[in-house]
C-alpha cells in the first residue's frame, strides 16, 4: 500500500473543483494515512482559478498535502497519477447541437485518455464527472488501450445519493439506514432509479411506500433533481456533486463492506447492457475493484426503463463512432 498518492483533478479551477480540493487534501478521498500530491489541470482560461485554489490549499496547512502542481499540460497533470477525477468538460450550451457537444468533448477526453495511457501509474483509477459523463468516459477509455477498461468509470453516485436522500426523507429515517438502491443507465434524465431491492433498516422499502409514489414522484424527482437544484439555487449542484465524487472514489479504493452503490462502469454484458457501454449498475467494492451485484430479477417495468436509458447510451456511442472520436 502506497503512503503517497498522486491525485489529478481536471477542471480544478471550476466550482466542483473548488469544493473537491479541500476534501481531498484533508484526507477524505483516500483515507487518513495517505499523503496526497495534487495535480490540477486547467485550460489557460481556468488557470487563475486553480492557482487561487492552490494558494488557499497552502493556507489551510493540511498535514496530508504533500505538493500542489497547477498546469495546462495533460502530460504533466497525469504523470504518475493514481487517481484521476475528470471534472472539466464542455457541457451543452444553449442551442448547441448534439454533434458539436460530442465533438467538443472528444477533443478533451481523447487527449486526456492518451495522456493517462502514457503517464499514469499502473493502479490508476478514473472517474469522469464532466458531462456527458458516461460517453466522455467511453472516449477516454478508447484512447487508453494499455489501461484495463474497468479502471474507467463515470459518476452516478450523485444520482444514487439523491435517491437515498429522498427516500430517507420520505420514510423519516437516517440516510445511513437505506441500502439496496440502484441507479441504472445513463447519467441523464433517462436514468432509472430503482427501489425494487431497497431496504430501510432491514425492512423492504416496497412494503413501506406505494408504487404510485415511486413512479409518479420519486423516479422523476431523482432524474430531474439537477434541474430542481438549478431552479432553487440559481446554479448547478456543486457541493453534492463533489461529495458524491469523494464517496465514489473512497469506496472504490477502500471497499464498502458489501453495501450497494451505483457506478457507471464498462458493461460486461450483465443485465442485457451491451458490452463496453459505460452504464450505471448496482455495485459493491471488493478488493479495490467494483463488482456488479449479480443475479437480480428484473421486472417488466424495470426492463423497459433500463432498456430506454441504455438505448440512449448506445446512440451516443454510435454518434462518437461516426465522428471518429473512438
Ligand atoms: P465549472 O464551469 O465551474 O468548471 C469547469 C472547469 O473545467 C472550468 O474551470 C473550465 O476551465 C475547466 N475545463 C474545461 N475544459 C477543460 C479541459 N479540457 N481540461 C481541464 N479543465 C477544463 O463547472 P462545474 O460546476 O465545476 O461542473 C463541471 C462539470 O461537472 C460539468 O460538465 C457539469 O455538467 C458536470 N457535473 C456532473 C455531475 C454528475 O453527477 N456526473 C453533477 C454536477 C455537474
Image (spheres, helix red, strand yellow):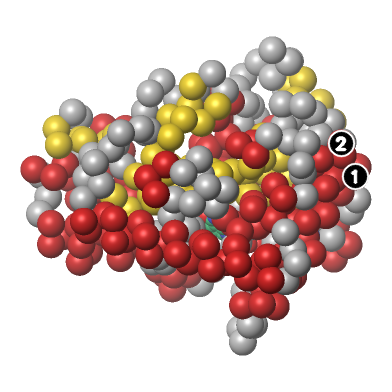
Q: Residue at x 66, y 77 (%)?
A: 99
Q: Are marks 1 and 2 in contact (CB under 8 Å)?
A: yes
Residue 29 lies, in percent from the top left, at 61, 31
Left or right side of 26 for 214: left
Q: Quadrant of the C terminus?
A: bottom right
Circle 2 Cα neighbour tier, 10 Å, few/some/many (<14 / 14–19 / ≥20): some
Report which residue position mark 2 lands on.
Answer: 119
Q: Residues within 10 Å of mark 1 (few under 14, many from 20)?
A: some
108 or 316, nearer to the observer? 316
Q: What is the spatial separation of the Cα atoms under label 1 and label 2, in whole angstroms?
A: 7 Å
In the figure, 140 relative to 46: above or below? above
Residue 107's place in the image compared with 295, above or below, is: below
Dot 2: element: helix
- Residue extending farthest to the bottom is 95
Q: Splitting the image into 4 quarters, where does residue 249 fall? A: top right
Q: Quadrant of residue 5?
A: top right
Residue 75 tag number: 1
Q: Residue furthest top?
A: 1
State yes or no: Cβ of the residue under disc 2 lies below 8 Å from any atom of ligand 1: no
Identify which residue, 165 or 205, lies in the foreground: 205
Please say whether residue 6 is visible from this viewpoint: no
Measured from the top left, where is residue 313 in percent x and y? Answer: 51, 62
- Residue 319 visible, this angle: yes
Q: Earlier in the sequence, mark 1 or mark 2?
A: 1
Judging depth in this view, the residue of 1 and 293 nearest the camera is 293
Residue at the image point whose x is 61% and y is 52% from the top:
129
Position of residue 245 measured from the top left corner of the image (x, y, whole percent)? 56, 43
Respond yes or no on whether mark 1 lies under 8 Å from ligand 1: no
Q: Is residue 287 left or right of residue 298?
A: right
Amino acid at each position: 500500500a502506497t503512503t503517497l498518492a498522486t491525485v489529478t483533478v481536471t477542471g480544478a479551477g471550476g466550482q466542483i473543483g473548488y469544493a473537491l480540493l479541500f476534501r481531498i487534501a484533508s484526507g477524505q478521498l483516500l483515507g487518513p494515512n495517505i499523503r496526497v500530491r495534487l495535480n490540477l489541470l486547467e485550460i489557460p482560461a481556468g488557470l487563475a482559478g486553480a492557482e487561487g485554489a492552490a494558494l488557499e490549499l497552502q493556507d489551510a496547512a493540511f498535514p496530508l498535502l504533500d505538493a500542489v502542481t497547477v498546469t495546462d499540460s495533460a502530460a504533466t497533470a497525469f504523470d504518475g497519477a493514481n487517481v484521476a477525477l475528470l471534472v472539466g468538460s464542455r457541457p451543452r450550451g444553449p442551442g448547441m447541437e448534439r454533434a458539436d457537444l460530442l465533438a467538443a468533448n472528444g477533443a478533451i477526453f481523447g487527449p486526456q485518455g492518451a495522456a493517462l495511457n502514457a503517464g499514469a501509474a499502473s493502479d490508476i483509477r478514473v472517474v469522469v464527472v464532466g458531462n456527458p459523463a458516461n460517453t466522455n468516459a467511453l472516449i477516454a477509455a478508447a484512447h487508453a488501450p494499455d489501461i484495463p477498461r474497468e479502471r474507467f468509470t463515470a459518476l452516478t453516485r450523485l444520482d444514487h445519493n439523491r435517491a437515498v436522500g429522498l427516500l430517507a426523507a420520505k420514510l423519516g429515517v437516517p440516510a445511513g439506514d437505506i441500502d439496496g438502491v440502484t441507479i441504472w443507465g445513463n447519467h441523464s434524465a433517462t436514468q432509472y432509479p430503482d427501489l425494487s431491492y431497497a431496504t430501510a433498516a432491514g425492512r423492504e422499502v416496497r412494503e413501506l411506500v406505494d408504487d404510485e409514489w415511486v413512479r409518479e414522484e420519486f423516479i422523476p424527482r431523482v432524474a430531474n433533481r439537477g434541474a430542481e437544484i438549478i431552479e432553487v439555487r440559481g446554479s448547478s449542484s456543486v457541493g453534492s456533486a463533489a461529495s458524491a465524487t469523494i464517496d465514489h472514489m473512497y469506496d472504490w479504493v477502500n471497499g464498502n463492506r458489501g453495501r450497494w452503490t451505483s457506478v457507471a462502469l464498462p458493461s460486461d454484458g450483465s443485465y442485457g447492457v451491451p458490452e463496453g457501454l459505460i452504464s450505471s449498475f448496482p455495485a459493491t467494492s471488493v478488493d479495490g475493484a467494483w463488482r456488479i451485484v449479480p443475479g437480480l430479477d428484473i421486472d417488466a417495468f424495470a426492463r423497459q426503463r433500463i432498456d430506454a436509458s441504455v438505448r440512449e447510451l448506445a446512440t451516443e456511442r454510435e454518434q462518437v463512432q461516426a465522428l471518429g472520436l473512438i
